[in-house]
Amino acid sequence: MSQTEYVSPEKCPLCNQANFCGNLSNDDSKPCWCMDDNISFPGELLQLVPSEAQGKACICKACAQKFQQVKAL
Ligand SMILES: [Zn+2]
């Protein structure tokens, strides 16, 4: 079993924790947290995602915020 061949869409590709992406849930009334105006996904952050996970798994809120804080310092 290779760990790199299967990418779980529910897990953050950066920290491997649940990303809680609202787009995966069946509840259409709740937009994903990633639609929040305070959250952004700059190209630099997206480049940290392994190529096999790009377009498949979402980055989690914690990693997005951590990246923003590092950039803000
Ligand atoms: Zn993460």
Image: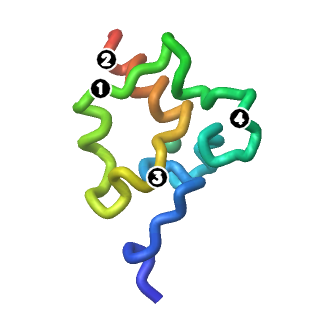
Report how far apart the C-alphas of labels 4 and 1 lie in the structure: 26 Å
In primary-sequence order, the first of circles 4 and 3 is: 4
Give the x, y percent position of residue 50.
30, 56
In primary-sequence order, the first of circles 3 and 2 is: 3
Report how far apart the C-alphas of labels 1 and 2 lie in the structure: 11 Å
Under mark 4, the amino acid is Asp
- Residue 28 location, quadrant: top right
Q: Secondary structure at mark 2?
A: helix
Under mark 2, the amino acid is Lys
- The residue depicted at 32 percent of the width and 63 percent of the height is 52
Give the x, y percent position of residue 59.
47, 41
Q: Nearer the viewer, residue 2 or 70?
A: 2
Give the x, y percent position of residue 23.
60, 41
Q: Where is mark 1, residue-wise?
A: 42
Report how far apart the C-alphas of labels 3 and 1 lie in the structure: 16 Å
How crowded pointer 4 is (Cα within 10 Å; few <14, some 14-19, many 20+) is rated as few
**Mark 1 in CB contact with mark 2 (< 8 angstroms):** yes
In the rendered view, does 23 fall on the left or right side of 41? Answer: right
- The residue depicted at 44 percent of the width and 53 percent of the height is 13
Under mark 3, the amino acid is Ala
Q: Which mark is residue 20?
A: none
How crowded pointer 1 is (Cα within 10 Å; few <14, some 14-19, many 20+) is rated as few
Image quadrant for the C terminus?
Answer: top left
Report how far apart the C-alphas of labels 4 and 3 lie in the structure: 19 Å
Under mark 1, the amino acid is Pro
Q: Where is mark 3, residue-wise?
A: 57
In primary-sequence order, the first of circles 4 and 1 is: 4
Q: Where is mark 4, residue-wise?
A: 28
Image depth: mark 2 or mark 4 in front: 4
In the rendered view, does 36 fall on the left or right side of 72? Answer: right
